[in-house]
């Protein structure tokens, strides 16, 4: 448009309309973009079997809330929009809440050695001082699981991640089995002891 003006031509009005359209998109997608930027901390959203729908609902809530503010700047208070946003977020909250999946019975004694070998196989590539998992410079969340003391110290948090929310191992990239989850659960429930 600047070049057209410099050359004394009249700029293509289509470019102006496109600019306005992008500006409207940016305005409405402020909140969804902010959410998407920190969503990697919320595995419950992107690891949900219908993660795309979770994202769409959260984006819809963001758009509705933003619309309220746009109208408010014009002096209109339309509370139905934040109410819709809250309802959508409430639904997502319920839909992504952890539901404990029953684990198979454990065969054989639940020893610390067994636990240590499972963790060594399924967790330590990420949760070590120098992770071998590509792209990780340090142990994620500061959680170390490479030595007995650290395994015990992080037992309760690991229970939540492995048994309740099932967010770990992340994306189950290390392919932990249901039996192994059951062994970890039994060991932690029995007091997380190193014999
Ligand atoms: C592929 C890499 C990877 C693997 C494998 C992995 N984790 Fe994680 N873990 C992460 C990342 C990344 C985070 C940080 C998530 C965040 O930023 O919220 C994390 C966070 C955690 C946390 C802290 C969560 C909290 O906020 O309390 C615990 C506990 C944990 N992992 C346990 C485990 C256990 C136990 C295993 C093995 C069964 C495991 N992780 C396997 C990548 C991994």
Image (spheres, rainbow, N blue to C red):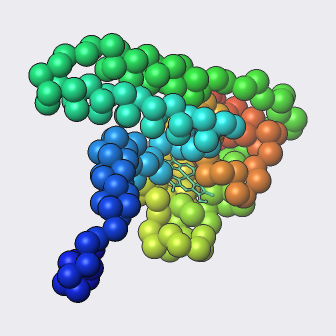
At x 12%, y 22%, the residue is 75
At x 58%, y 23%, the residue is 95
Measured as percent of width and height from the top left, residue 140 is found at 46, 59
Quarter of the picture containing the N terminus is: bottom left
Position of residue 146 relative to residue 5, above or below, is above
Q: Residue furthest bottom?
A: 7
Quarter of the picture containing the C terminus is: top right
Measured as percent of width and height from the top left, residue 176 is found at 75, 49
Position of residue 51 relative to residue 7, above or below, is above
In the figure, is residue 58 to the left or right of 126?
left
Q: Residue furthest right?
A: 107
Measured as percent of width and height from the top left, residue 160 is found at 55, 34
At x 14%, y 30%, the residue is 73
Q: Is residue 192 visible?
A: no
Measured as percent of width and height from the top left, residue 162 is found at 63, 40
Position of residue 152 relative to residue 138, above or below, is above
Q: Residue furthest front?
A: 9
* Along the viewing direction, whichever of 20 and 30 lies nearer the viewer: 20
At x 61%, y 52%, the residue is 170
Position of residue 78 relative to residue 112, above or below, is above
In the figure, is residue 125 to the left or right of 56?
right
* Along the viewing direction, whichever of 174 and 48 lies nearer the viewer: 48
* Along the viewing direction, whichever of 22 and 144 lies nearer the viewer: 22
Q: How many marks?
A: 0
Q: Is residue 18 visible?
A: yes
Q: Quadrant of residue 10?
A: bottom left
In the figure, is residue 76 to the left or right of 186?
left
């Amino acid at each position: 448009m600047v070049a057209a003006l410099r050359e004394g031509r009249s700029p293509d009005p289509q470019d102006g309309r496109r600019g306005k359209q992008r500006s409207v998109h940016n305005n409405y997608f402020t909140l969804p973009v902010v959410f998407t930027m920190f969503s990697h901390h919320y595995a419950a959203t992107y690891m949900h079997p219908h993660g795309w729908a979770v994202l769409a609902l959260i984006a819809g809530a963001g758009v509705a809330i933003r619309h309220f503010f746009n109208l408010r700047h014009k002096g209109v208070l339309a509370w139905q929009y934040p109410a819709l946003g809250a309802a959508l977020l409430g639904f997502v909250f319920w839909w992504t809440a952890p539901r404990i999946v029953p684990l198979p019975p454990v065969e054989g004694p639940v020893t610390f050695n067994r636990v240590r070998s499972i963790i060594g196989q399924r967790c330590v590539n990420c949760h070590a001082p120098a992770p071998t998992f590509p792209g990780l410079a340090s142990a994620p969340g500061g959680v170390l699981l490479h030595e007995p003391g650290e395994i015990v110290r992080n037992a309760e948090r690991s229970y939540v991640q492995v048994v309740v929310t099932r967010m770990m191992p992340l994306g189950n990239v290390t392919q932990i089995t249901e039996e192994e989850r059951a062994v970890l659960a039994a060991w932690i429930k029995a007091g997380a002891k190193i014999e």
